Image (cartoon, rainbow, N blue to C red):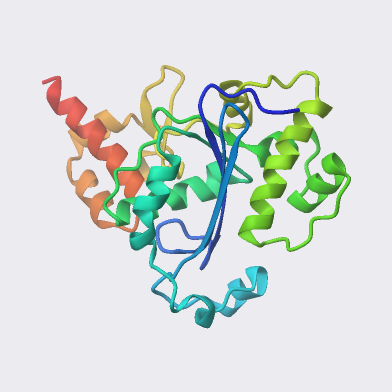
Amino acid sequence: MDLKLHRPICFFDLETTGIKIAKDRIVEISILKIHPNQNKESYTWRVNPEMPIPQETTAVHGIKDEDVVNEPTFKELAPKVNQLIEGCDLAGYNSNRFDIPLLAEEMMRADIDFDMKKVQAVDVQTIFHKKEKRTLEAAYKFYCQKDLTNAHSAEADTLATYEVLKSQLDFYDDLENDTKWLAEFSAHKKFADLAGFITYNKKGEEVFSFGKHKGKKVEDVLEKEPGYFGWIQNADFPLYTKKVLTRIKLRKLATK
């Protein structure tokens, strides 16, 4: 079943130096752009992460330091990536928890104002886990009746994720062929940022989800303990989290 799209959607996958959103870097990115008329564009880039790739990470995706030493940095690639995904929705496998937050970090390090406010994010892994609870390889075998070769290659994983979503729409009658619906269905708990440090209460107000102020309204904490804002800005939090916190602070100041 082809996807019913109101605007393009970009399936993407990252291979990285590790799993720490604020510290690790992209070593390979693959993007499959699907247009509403079902035309496709596919791009894959190796990336120089400007840091060593740990051996345990190389064991997963097979990319070594020498494989990327002469490749462009993400800052050099960022304008191309941004132009490709601008005005598009995003989709991936475990993308809401990892790929999108890490992509946001890389974009912001490259001085590109990455913002998800108007973007629908479809996480194919979440749909799969809600329905079957298995890995991408198992999902590909289950839904597409094919073995996934070259697993943990960004290009192979990206194409497999796209094919799995199309097959999921054929398999489950209750899944709506609509990007917004799929994004809502595949979403985890809704976060104000991307990494889950700021979430929402039942009233839709931003609250901290960690530390001594867990469950407290962000606006109240920033007003009563202004030093907490400075601590987060100077600590090892993702750039997108800091951006959201700054937005909340400025919004509060504007209402005074």
For the point 68% across and 41% down, which residue is it? 162
The answer to whether residue 136 is above or below residue 121 is: below
Q: Where is residue 126 in the image (x, y as percent from the top left)?
A: 67, 37
Closest to the observer, 198 or 58: 58
Splitting the image into 4 quarters, where does residue 147 fall? bottom right
For the point 86% across and 50% down, which residue is it? 146
Q: Can residue 238 be seen in this view?
A: no
Q: Position of residue 221 (x, y in %)?
A: 26, 35
Q: Is residue 53 left or right of residue 57?
A: left
The answer to whether residue 82 is above or below residue 88 is: below
Which quadrant of the figure contains the C terminus? top left
The answer to whether residue 116 is above or below residue 81 is: above
Numbered label tally:
0
Closest to the observer, 247 or 116: 116
For the point 45% across and 47% down, which residue is it? 101
Q: Give the residue furthest to the right.
A: 145
Q: Is residue 156 left or right of residue 251?
A: right
Q: Position of residue 112 (x, y in %)?
A: 29, 48
Which quadrant of the figure contains the N terminus? top right
Q: Position of residue 164 (x, y in %)?
A: 75, 40
